Amino acid sequence: MYDELETRLGWIAGDLRAGGTSLRMTVRQFIALIGAKGRGYRKVNLLRGALARHGLKTMPDFATADIDSPIAFVSISDGRRVTPTDTGTRVGFEVPAGHACGRGIGGSAARSSSTSAEVPAVPESEDIWVAIDFETATGSPDSACALGVAVIENGRVVSSGSWLIKPPGNDFSSWNIRVHGIRPEDTSYSPDYADLYPSILDLLEDRFVLAHWASFDMSVLRSVHAYYGIPLPNLRYACSCLMARRAFPTLPNHKLPTVCDHCGILLEHHHDAAADAVACAEVALHCRRTTGTRSLHEAVQLLVDGPRRL
């Protein structure tokens, strides 16, 4: 089965080196080359390793694009690419049709009216939040190795996804590996945070952000920006854990799995960055419904006295 993957990628790489075009496929067809139906960390790492061996990557990233989206193969050495045949197909995260990047918390206009192929769009609306979750490679807060996001629009999650991040030195502690399962080989070919940041800027700049135990995620955000010398984004944030403490005071604790279990929220893979970001978003929305408030902004104001500045 893996021989088929290596053979197919060899053909693609050869065609690109010869200046020709190559075969197109969807993400679903690509992961099926190893008999996979889904994209866990192990499967993604295996496919990334195979692509790297042949000097290839995909555009958009197969790990974050919609599973039925077309992907293009890019030769890392010369940048030559194969364009997907269906240029009208939305690639990247699933976002309701017709939405574009809109106005954020500062009221600033969006940079573009189009949706990035690899980043969830933040649509124009009145009650928009972006839930985030960082995983770290070591005990140091500047060692981000994964980022998950979930975009909330008017009471529902409209898009989600995650990125693997190469931490400084690609160093990992055994303890952190046991927690989230991400290993150095998983991030060997991933961008570091400085390279990733331009792709995620629109998710953070002038946004309202949620995180479960936000003091941790905001500490990671501050630390990676300090490490790479990147100015902090202008955002305001709220903690879904603190919201849950006020909304559900009788729970034995307010860890994400506990709150999800209480609220009937499915959390199959705790410490998967995307899964945790979606769960954080759903917890905040459940708090909103519990309080009977008209918007997530009102719920945040009621439960935690409004969002804080980073």
Image (cartoon, grey):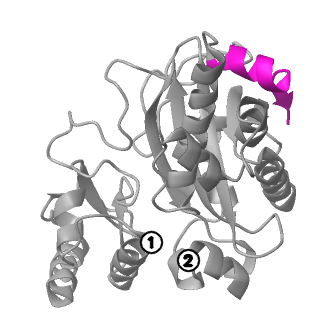
> Does residue 229 lie above or below 56 as drawn?
above
- Residue 98, quarter of the rendered image: top left
| CA neighbours of label 1 inside 10 A, class few (<14), some (14 to 19), many (20+) | some
Which residue shows up at 31% across the image and 47% down it? Answer: 66
Side of 5 relative to 128 (left or right): left
Report if residue 199 is visible in the image: no
The image quadrant where one finds the C terminus is top right
Q: 240 and 37: which one is in front? A: 240
**Residue 302 colored in magenta in the image:** yes
Q: 84 and 282: which one is in front? A: 282
List x then y, in percent, for residue 302. Answer: 78, 17
At mark 1, the secondary structure is helix
Which residue shows up at 59% across the image and 72% down it? Answer: 180
Q: 162 and 79: which one is in front? A: 162
- Rounded to the nearest angstrom, the CA distance separating label 1 from label 2 is 8 Å
List x then y, in percent, for residue 193. Answer: 67, 59
Q: 71 and 302: which one is in front? A: 302
> Does residue 20 lie above or below 217 as drawn?
below
Q: Main secondary structure of the magenta part?
A: helix
Which residue shows up at 52% across the image and 44% down it? Answer: 278
**Residue 77 colored in magenta in the image:** no
* Residue type, mark 2 in image: Gly
List x then y, in percent, for residue 44. Answer: 39, 71
Q: Which residues are magenta?
A: 296-310
Q: Which residue is mark 1?
A: 41
Report if residue 141 is visible in the image: yes
Question: Residue 181 — which label?
Answer: 2
> Does residue 129 lie above or below 161 as drawn?
above
Pointer 1 with pointer 2, Cβ within 8 A: yes
